[in-house]
């Protein structure tokens, strides 16, 4: 979609395209504004990861993360499409909560609510061979 607006450079009022001078102030200089709008899908995924750190002296940079929240869209290999993820890890209170939802149907694909110390065998906590 494309649209055009012509205004007087002096009084900022809209003027006709074929006019030589502004009918309001007599100025002969015009500003032509072109508005171009194109819509297309980039296939971008929204996702936010937030880490709350407690800066205690002597702790390594990974050990001082108190709370970690991950919210947004991830690709599911099983479903073959993007799904909504909400994951909260609270190391201070030993809590782990994760919920994965199909955004099209609202169906809960996976939900896990347990203590963080019991959440083993997943991701980087898997047994290494």
Image (spheres, rainbow, N blue to C red):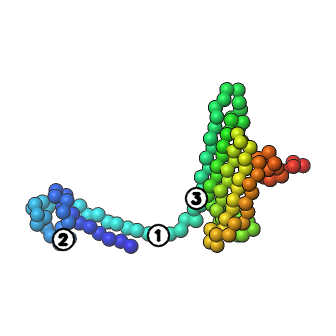
- Residue closer to the observer: 90 or 72: 90
Q: Residue at x 64, y 62 (%)?
A: 84
100 up-or-down from 16: above or below: above
- Residue closer to the observer: 83 or 24: 83
Find disc 3 in the rendering and name its residue.
Answer: 46
Of badges 3 and 1, nearer the viewer stands: 3
Q: Quadrant of residue 94?
A: top right
- Residue 114 % position (x, y): 76, 52
Q: Residue at x 44, y 69 (%)?
A: 38
Find disc 1 in the rendering and name its residue.
Answer: 39
Dot placed on the residue nearer the N-terminal end, 3 or 1: 1
- Residue 16 % position (x, y): 18, 71
Numbered label attached to residue 16? 2
Q: Give the class, few, some or many, for how many residues have Cα within 10 Å of label 1's Cα (few <14, many ≥20).
A: few
- Residue 119 % position (x, y): 79, 50
Q: Residue at x 73, y 50 (%)?
A: 96
Dot placed on the residue nearer the N-terminal end, 2 or 1: 2
């Amino acid at each position: 979609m494309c649209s055009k607006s012509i205004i007087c450079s002096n009084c900022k009022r809209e003027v006709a395209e074929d006019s030589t001078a502004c009918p309001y102030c007599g100025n002969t200089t015009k500003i032509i504004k072109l508005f171009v709008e194109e819509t297309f899908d980039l296939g971008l995924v929204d996702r936010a990861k937030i880490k709350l750190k407690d800066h205690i002296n002597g702790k390594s940079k990974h050990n001082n993360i108190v709370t970690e929240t991950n919210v947004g869209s991830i690709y599911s290999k099983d479903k073959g499409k993007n799904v909504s993820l909400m994951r909260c890890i609270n190391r201070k209170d030993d809590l782990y909560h994760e919920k994965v939802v199909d955004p099209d149907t609202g169906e809960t694909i996976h939900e896990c609510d347990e203590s963080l110390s019991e959440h083993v065998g997943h991701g980087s906590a898997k047994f290494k061979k």
